[in-house]
Image (cartoon, rainbow, N blue to C red):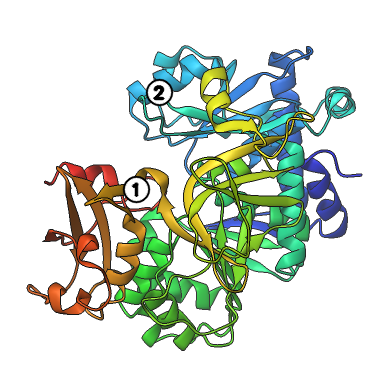
Amino acid sequence: MIRHIDDFLQKSVQLYPEKTAFVEGDLSINYKDFNTLSQKLASEISSHLKHSFTQESVLILLPKGIACLISFFGVAKSGHFYTLLDEKSPKERLEKIKTVLKPKLLITSKAYDFEFLGIKTLYCEDFSNFKINENALIKAKEKHIDTNLLYVFFTSGSTGLPKGVSIAHKSVIDYTFWVCETFKLDEHEILANQAPFYFDNSILDIFSSIKAGACVHILENSLFAFPAKVLSYLEQHHISMIFWVPSVLIYFANTQALDELKLSKLKKVLFCGEIMPNKALNYWRKHLPKAEYANLYGPTEITDVCCFYKVNRNFKDEDILPIGKACHNTQLLVFDENLKLIDEEQVGVKGELFVRGTSLALGYYNDKDKTSLAFIQNPLHNAYLDLVYKTGDIVAYNEFGELLCYGRKDNQIKIKGHRVELGEIESIINAHKDIKNCACIYKDERIICFYESKLLELDFKGFLKDKLPSYMLPSKFMALKHFKLNQNGKIDKKALYELV
């Protein structure tokens, strides 16, 4: 029985000890050496954090790379849980998270100065010098249960205080089994990672590849500003699978990056994190018609993904791509404002998506109030404790029983007596042949659309006349050279409000 995420690693170490597990630039590491270094780190952690009846938190401040992954497994093997933060995080944010997390140990590099945090520190440069303590590792494994935390990822809080999403081993294990079975990952798979490791999309890249005995190439975030270089890398290293945020795929489509390269080895194109415009997807499908495409959906609180749609039919540019149906061991529930269930027969009726299943987070770390607001008793009964997570996303069923996502509930506005989803407006405008990307906000009782385009003037009124009712038409259109993206590669909508 798989109870610990390390069980996946041990099986791959046994089957493929000399096989390359991770590639980072000119560096690479095989499964055997990766396991050895993580054992050394786990032993060192165990010498500083004595086992009790609760786990301790270990903070990691490292750039995306092999040392970061060794840290993940070192912490997990020691019986504790990790939190990775961007090493470039502002001091104020680090202090806020430290207050919530109360970490007992910090793992970082000697290249950085985090002495102001006042936390006992281990350095990645010393990993190879640590000694393996077999007794400590055995003891930690014996005490482990699968509801123990694996990691806590921090998301932005509406009050300014970050929320720590707490994810257990069992949730990642369940998710990893689903990924490997659904997309048929094996030891021959070669993935190219785009997501930062503090972003939950990276969970698929990391743990699914380890379970399958596959190889992951870790691409620098800065590289994605140069689509031709990225695609050349994919071709050169025979990358067979990617799982990227739509913003990156959109950017590559807008720059027509696929026009010159065949990417003959790329067979699986997965995406998640935002609504994927069909115009950009159709570009990818035209140039890589034999690849499998899948739209994955899920918040951090549901261990990355809770539903998916394998693209199996053609869509017009202005269509909304389905987010599909539930992953196994997961149930999706759609409720109206009065918590009345909306079923698959009620095609087109919009409501908020609630999720239940093994992959549900264990709440927000050290924050009972926010946890109780987001993780609630299943509205369908009160017979026993049955928590569901309120996603805050507006969805509706289509005629195939698939869910369509119209965006965030907080992006749902009321204008001239009508409820409007800004995401629905964005989908239509993104279908315009001269629009690279767009985003809508609602401010001062006006819908404002920001967009990227090569053209200075566009006839939005003529384009939208037969596509949107008058109350959904933006009152102002503002051209931008480039959208500002947040740390996860998504459009930073908060920054747009400052431009009006």
**Which residue is at 30% across, 75% downward?**
254
Which image quadrant for residue 443?
A: top left
Residue 132 is left or right of residue 311, and the answer is: right
**Which residue is at 47% across, 41% downward?**
63
Q: Position of residue 114 (x, y in %)?
A: 42, 21
Q: Position of residue 53 (x, y in %)?
A: 79, 13
**Which residue is at 47% across, 14% downward?**
99
Q: Position of residue 494 (x, y in %)?
A: 27, 42
Looking at the image, can residue 126 be seen? Answer: no
Judging by the rendered image, the residue that carries numbered circle 1 is 411
Quadrant of image for the N terminus: top right
The amino acid type, in three-letter code, at marker 2 is Leu
Looking at the image, can residue 464 be seen? Answer: yes
For numbered disc 2, what is the local secondary structure? loop
The amino acid type, in three-letter code, at marker 1 is Asn
**Towards the viewer: 334 or 214:** 334
Residue 93 is left or right of residue 262, and the answer is: left
Residue 252 is left or right of residue 244, and the answer is: left
Q: Is residue 422 above or below residue 97?
A: below
Judging by the rendered image, the residue that carries numbered circle 2 is 161
**Towards the viewer: 95 or 26:** 95
**Which residue is at 30% across, 48% downward?**
413
The outermost residue toward the left is: 457
**Towards the viewer: 437 or 414:** 414
Q: Is residue 328 above or below residue 252?
A: above
